[in-house]
Image (spheres, grey):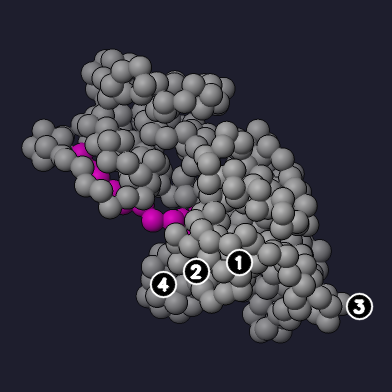
C-alpha cells in the first residue's frame, strides 16, 4: 500500500490548554508542487508549549504540532521533478505564497499569506507531512535527521540575527541568554570569524556549556555584565550584541555594551520598554539597534554546509529522542513549561 492511501499516527492539539492527543488520520496526498515527507525527526520546541497552552494563537483545531522537521521524500506531487523518493531533506517551516513582493525580495517572513507548519497548518508530530517542494533543503548524509530538524528553528534564527547585525570577521560578539538560540549563536559567531564571544547568563551550567564552545563566560549574577565586557575589551565594548532573552534589562545591557559603530540585534520577544541615552549610546557612537524576526530560507543552505563540515555541532544539544507518543510528548512539553534543565528532545516516529 502506498502512503497516499493509508492512515497515519499524529499527535494533535485538539483544544488549547488541554494535553495533545494521539490521532489516527489520513495521510495527505501531495497536490501539484507538493511533496509528501516521511518524518524521521521532529524537534519539540518551547513555542509548541505556548501553542498547547493557548498563549500563542494557532490555525483551526485539531492541528498537528511540530515545525522542526527532517525526513525522507515519500512521494512527489505533479510538477515536482528535481526531487526523488528517498532523498534526505529538512523543511523550512514557513510556507509562503512565493509571489508577493516580500517573497520576491527573499524576505518571505513578511508574506501576508505565510503559514507556519505546526502552527497554522499541520506540522511534523506525525508519520508524514505534506509541504511545498520549495520548502525543502537537501540534508547531507553526514548530518543526522535529529540535528537537521532542530537546525530549522533556533539555529537559523541565530544566523539571521548575526546577518542582520552585519557581523564580520574580527568582531567581538556579546550573546545575552545562553539557551538554544545562544548555544547556536556562539558556534555561528565563531564560524563567522569573531575574535571573541562573550556569553552572558546567570546559570553556571549554561556558562559552562558556553565555555566548552569557546566563549568567554560572563556571569551576570556576579556583577554588571556591561562592566565585565568593557573590562575584557580594554573599555572598547562589543561590536555586535545579540539579545536572546526578551527582557528590558538585557536589551538595555545589549545596547549599553556596544563599541563605536556597534550593532545590537534584538531577538527576544517583549513589548516592555527600555531606556536609551540617545546621544551617548547611539548618536555619538553611530551605534544601531536592529530588530530581528525569524529567519530566511536562503540562510539554511549555509547552515547545513557548516554542519556537514563540522563547524557546527548540535549533538550535545539533543539530550534524547522519544517515540511518537502523546503521553511522552506531553511530558516533554510540561518540562519545557517549567524551564527544566534538559536540552533538546526530538521525536523519532
Ligand atoms: Zn522551534
Ligand atoms: Zn508572499
Viewer can see residue 28:
yes
Circles 2, 3 touching at the beta carbon (< 8 Å): no
Circle 2 — which element? loop
In the foreground, 130 or 20: 20
Residue 13, disc: 1
Q: Residues within 10 Å of mark 3 (few under 14, many from 20)?
A: few
Task: For mark 1, give the secondary structure.
Answer: strand
Q: Which mark is residue 337?
A: none
Image x and y of residue 124, in percent: 66, 63
Q: Nearer the viewer, mark 2 or mark 3?
A: 2
Q: Report crowding for label 2: few under 14, some 14 to 19, many 20 or more residues within 10 A (C-alpha).
A: many
What residue did someone put label 3 on? Answer: 1
Q: Which residues are magenta?
A: 287-299
Q: Looking at the image, which residue is at 36% across and 50% down?
A: 269
Between discs 4 and 1, the one toward the N terminus: 1
Ligand 2 within 8 Å of disc 4? The answer is yes
Report if the beta carbon of the residue with label 2 is closer than 8 angstroms to ligand 1: no
Amino acid at each position: 500500500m502506498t502512503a497516499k492511501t493509508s492512515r497515519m499516527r499524529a499527535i494533535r492539539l485538539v483544544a488549547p490548554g488541554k494535553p495533545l492527543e494521539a490521532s489516527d488520520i489520513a495521510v495527505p496526498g501531495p497536490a501539484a508542487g507538493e511533496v509528501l515527507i516521511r518524518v524521521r525527526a521532529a524537534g519539540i520546541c518551547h513555542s509548541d508549549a505556548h501553542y498547547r497552552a493557548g498563549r500563542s494563537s494557532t490555525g483551526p483545531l485539531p492541528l498537528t504540532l511540530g515545525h522542526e522537521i527532517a525526513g525522507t521524500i515519500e512521494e512527489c506531487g505533479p510538477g515536482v521533478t528535481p526531487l526523488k523518493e528517498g532523498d534526505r531533506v529538512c523543511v523550512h517551516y514557513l510556507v509562503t505564497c512565493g509571489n508577493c513582493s516580500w517573497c520576491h525580495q527573499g524576505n518571505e517572513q513578511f508574506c501576508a499569506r505565510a503559514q507556519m507548519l505546526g502552527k497554522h497548518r499541520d506540522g511534523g508530530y506525525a508519520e508524514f507531512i505534506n509541504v511545498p517542494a520549495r520548502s525543502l533543503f537537501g540534508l547531507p548524509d553526514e548530518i543526522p535527521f535529529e540535528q537537521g530538524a532542530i537546525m530549522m528553528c533556533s539555529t537559523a534564527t541565530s544566523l539571521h540575527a548575526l546577518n542582520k547585525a552585519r557581523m564580520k570577521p574580527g568582531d567581538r560578539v556579546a550573546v545575552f541568554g545562553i539557551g538554544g538560540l545562544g548555544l547556536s549563536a556562539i558556534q555561528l559567531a565563531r564560524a563567522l570569524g569573531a575574535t571573541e564571544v562573550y556569553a552572558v547568563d546567570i546559570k553556571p551550567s549554561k556558562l559552562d556549556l558556553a565555555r566548552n564552545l569557546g566563549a568567554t563566560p560572563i556571569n551576570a549574577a556576579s556583577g554588571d555584565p556591561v562592566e565585565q565586557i568593557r573590562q575584557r575589551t580594554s573599555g572598547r565594548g562589543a561590536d555586535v550584541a545579540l539579545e536572546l532573552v526578551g527582557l528590558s534589562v538585557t536589551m538595555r545591557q545589549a545596547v549599553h555594551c556596544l563599541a563605536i559603530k556597534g550593532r545590537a540585534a534584538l531577538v527576544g520577544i517583549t513589548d516592555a520598554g527600555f531606556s536609551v541615552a540617545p546621544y551617548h549610546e547611539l548618536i555619538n557612537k553611530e551605534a544601531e539597534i536592529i530588530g530581528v524576526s525569524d529567519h530566511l530560507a536562503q540562510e539554511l543552505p549555509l547552515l547545513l554546509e557548516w554542519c556537514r563540515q563540522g563547524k557546527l555541532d548540535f549533538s550535545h544539544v539533543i539530550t534524547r529522542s522519544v517515540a511518537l507518543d502523546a503521553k511522552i510528548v506531553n511530558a516533554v512539553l510540561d518540562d519545557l513549561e517549567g524551564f527544566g534543565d534538559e536540552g533538546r528532545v526530538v521525536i523519532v516516529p
